Image (cartoon, rainbow, N blue to C red):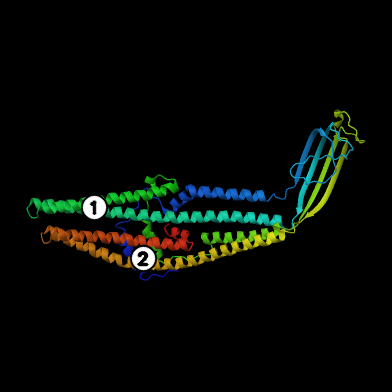
Amino acid sequence: MLRFKHSWCLAILLLATGSLYAQTPDKSITLKDLLKQVSQNAPTLLSDSSAVLIREAQARETGYNWLPNLKLNYQVNLGTNNNVGGPYFGFGMVPSNNRGVRDESNTTAVLANLGIAAFDMEIYNFGAYKAQNKVADAEVAVQQRQFETSKYNLQAYTIDNYLQLMRLQEYLTVQMRNIERNQEIRRSIRALAKSGIRAGVDTSIAEAELSKSRLNYIELKNQAEQIRLKLSAISGMPSQAIIADTAAENKLFNQSAESRLFYADTTNHPVIRYYQSLYENSLQREELVKKSYNPKISLQAAAWGRAASLDANNNFTSLRNGWGFQRENYLVGLGITYNLFDLKRRQLKLNTQKITSQYTRTKLNEQKVLLAASATQADANVSTAMERLQEIPKQLKAANAAYRQKFSLYKSGLTDIIELNAALALLYRAEIDFISAKFSYTQALFQKAVTENQVNTVINLLN
């Protein structure tokens, strides 16, 4: 847990000075609501969720690998029955002719028909089916973890842009106030110039400063619109409807000052869970390699009937005698199959898979180290940002007092436009620095939350 010194004093200063800049437009959207829109409409998440469905369908498909084969075949054939003796290899489809060898060649046509029902089932393969199902489930887990990681990264991207928009909106408020100050100075100079107290050149200088302020406002407005367009692309909301709630910062500062912060939960971090799933998937693949080359026990059965126009005495009869079934048979068998050379194949493939497992384990450990380092860095960033916030209000208060004094002196003719503009620039810089300090603290706190898997905890502080 982070510990902050002078927390209550800081909270009072922030609330006092922050109220000058924080605005809550009627149509602003909270960060929580924006994240909800992103999770529902982001194109990346929609495609990743479809990928999960594909993996789940593939897992269901793998679960039915045990299904047997039952093939039905019927054929009617017309051809010769003219054999010679001798063995051969049946490469491809070799026509079968089971009559004996005759002394003389005879190319008379024979009509035959054959109907077959063949059953084949791998009833036991020493755990290969189970290993296949476990690998399929692991693939689903990997895809789900990848989806969670994508969602988490998109969440971090949304938060960063929302905070950028919040800062730019506050910049615009300060810039508008700066324009109003320059307009006030210009009005005063014109009145003093008409009375002859001030030279006309002061009016030109004031006009230049006012124009510069307006140009800065236009540039800031463009930057804010670019951020809105980015958020619109991932949330599905119109860009003009995305207005950050700048008052949320004060809620966060107040809650933080009360030390309602969080502990790290890197064990369940989506990135760690993703790499953990990759490692577990690789281990399951090792088991599958071991089981894939085991012997296979199969049950086979067949029933068939046939007829031919060639009779039992090897006489060629009328072709019409080849219709219908003259003989029926069946055959049932139990067999075991094993390829001895699979021993070497299994060894080589298992070695490759083990190297893959070592690699995924190394990546998992690497991510743990990186997260731990990022968490330490995030703590340092939060502490540094808090120290800045403790000092910035003093600068802002002093700069505001200096500007008011210089403006009064200028209207009394006791100082010139150069010193007044310098005081105005100092006040403007102090206001910008104050907004930057608030942004740095908020950004550091959310970076810590992202690193330590506690984003929801910080978001709840804004409610």
Kind of residue indicated by mark 2: Ala
Query: Along the polypeptide, which appears first: circle 1 or circle 2?
Result: 1
For mark 1, what is the residue?
213
At 77% from the left edge and 38% from the top edge, which residue is drawn? Answer: 73
Q: Is residue 25 visible?
A: no
**Can you give x and y, in whole percent of width and height, for residue 118 in the image?**
79, 43
**Can you give x and y, in whole percent of width and height, for residue 403 in the image?**
20, 61
**Can you give x and y, in whole percent of width and height, for residue 190 in the image?**
12, 51
**Rendered image: mark on residue 298:** none
The reply, left or right, for residue 434 in relation to residue 443 is left
At 43% from the left edge and 61% from the top edge, which residue is drawn? Answer: 447
Q: Quadrant of residue 171?
A: bottom left
**Rendered image: mark on residue 385:** 2
Report helix, strand or loop for mark 1. Answer: helix
The reply, left or right, for residue 427 in relation to residue 409 is right
Report helix, strand or loop for mark 2. Answer: helix
Label 1 neighbourhood size at 10 Å, few (<14), some (14-19), many (20+)?
Answer: some
The reply, left or right, for residue 335 in relation to residue 427 is right
Label 2 neighbourhood size at 10 Å, few (<14), some (14-19), many (20+)?
Answer: many
At 38% from the left edge and 68% from the top edge, which residue is drawn? Answer: 383
Position of the N terminus, as image quadrant, is bottom left
